[in-house]
Amino acid sequence: MLILGIETSCDETSIAVVSDGRDILSNVTASSLHLHKRYGGVVPEIACRHHTELINIVLRKALQKAKVSLRDIDAVSVTEGPGLVGALLIGISMAKALSYSLKVPLIGVNHLHAHLYSAMMNAGPPELPAAGLVVSGGHTCLVYIERVDKIELLGQTRDDACGEAFDKVAKIMKLGFPGGPIIEKKAHAGDPGRIKFPRTSLEKDTLDFSFSGIKTAVLYYVRDLEKEGSRIPAADICAGFQEAMVEMLLGKTEPACRKKGVKTLLVGGGVSANALLRSRLKLMGESLGMEVFFPPKGMSMDNAAMVAGLGYHFYKNGKFSGYRLTAEPNLNFFKKF
Ligand code: KG4
Ligand code: ZN
């Protein structure tokens, strides 16, 4: 069963061909990231222009690389949200056109759900039910995955997303964009114990997160040093910040896993590329007797293989979308499931 996946929710134009939900025949991505760097964040207009300019080329390359033609495709799966409304509409329009002309089903999928599914594409099929942690640039949430297509929200961030906090802290320190990989690299040379940034402690019984406090703490710390004319210890700040972020993520992920009594944790989204987060979650898994799954290399960031892979399960369960499918910029796990 060949599914063509299309992902255009943010700054990546990505198209993939995946067989039976797991075997990635192609996964071609053209990113407009380099065009956004000078603005310190993704500019929707620029992202949309880039999608329209490149989406046909990306489609051709994805088919060529997979050595298939459009006639071989059994269904088209596309990200319907959350994301930038204009950007989503470009992928959805292409998906509708392909589905209609090829007379194959159209399947709209949730971007956050696809991020979690990318962790299922790594090793052998993970044991379900599982807990899931999505850590991306726009979202941070904990979920309970009963089946591949049945998900319940357990907790989410009340303010900044985890990746957003990395991006904002990098901006405060004028390190560049996106902040996550830059902070991770700088942190290697720093001492994580030298600067202890405050951890936000929400109510004990909630599985929600909050990351705006730590971002403000870094802002004041850097401002005070600048006022004094002192040197900014960038590596130590990055190491201390990263340490605090990972601790706060674990602080809610561990109780979520215990509460649900699951044997598996799936982690997805851009921040799941972070090596410290990976190693700490692995350790947590070992101590709880759980297996922890991450996306395969290069698949933590936005990509269409995860969209095609997840689409296969919807296809098998006959969950198709009609041509009324439209962009859902604020789609979350509540609405879809
Ligand atoms: O999932 P993603 O590609 O896009 C969204 O759906 O939002 O995630 C992008 C986010 C950015 O905020 C970026 O700074 C963060 O993922 N990120 C990282 C790392 N690589 C990317 N954060 C921490 N450590 C990393 N190595
Ligand atoms: Zn994403």
Image: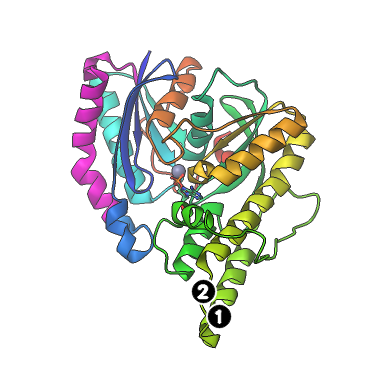
Q: How far apart are labels 1 and 2 at the CA level?
A: 7 Å
Disc 2 residue crowd, few under 14, some 14–19, many 20+, Cα 10 Å: some
* Residue placed most toward the observer, 103 or 7: 7
The mark found on residue 225 in the picture is 1
Q: Which residue is drawn at 60% across and 21% down?
A: 126
Residue 67's spot in the image, x, y percent?
23, 17
Task: Read off the residue under disc 2.
Answer: 232
Q: What residue type is labelled 1?
A: Leu
Q: Magenta includes 72?
A: yes
What secondary structure is marked by label 2? loop
Decide which of tag 1 and tag 2 comes sooner along the chain: 1
Q: Which residue is drawn at 42% across and 64% down?
A: 175
* Residue placed most toward the observer, 252 or 234: 234
Q: What stretch is highlighted in magenta?
A: 46-75
Residue 176's spot in the image, x, y percent?
39, 62
Q: Magenta includes 212?
A: no
Task: Answer left or right for 314 relative to 326.
Answer: right
Residue 76's spot in the image, x, y percent?
34, 25
Determine contact: label 1, label 2, CB under 8 Å.
yes
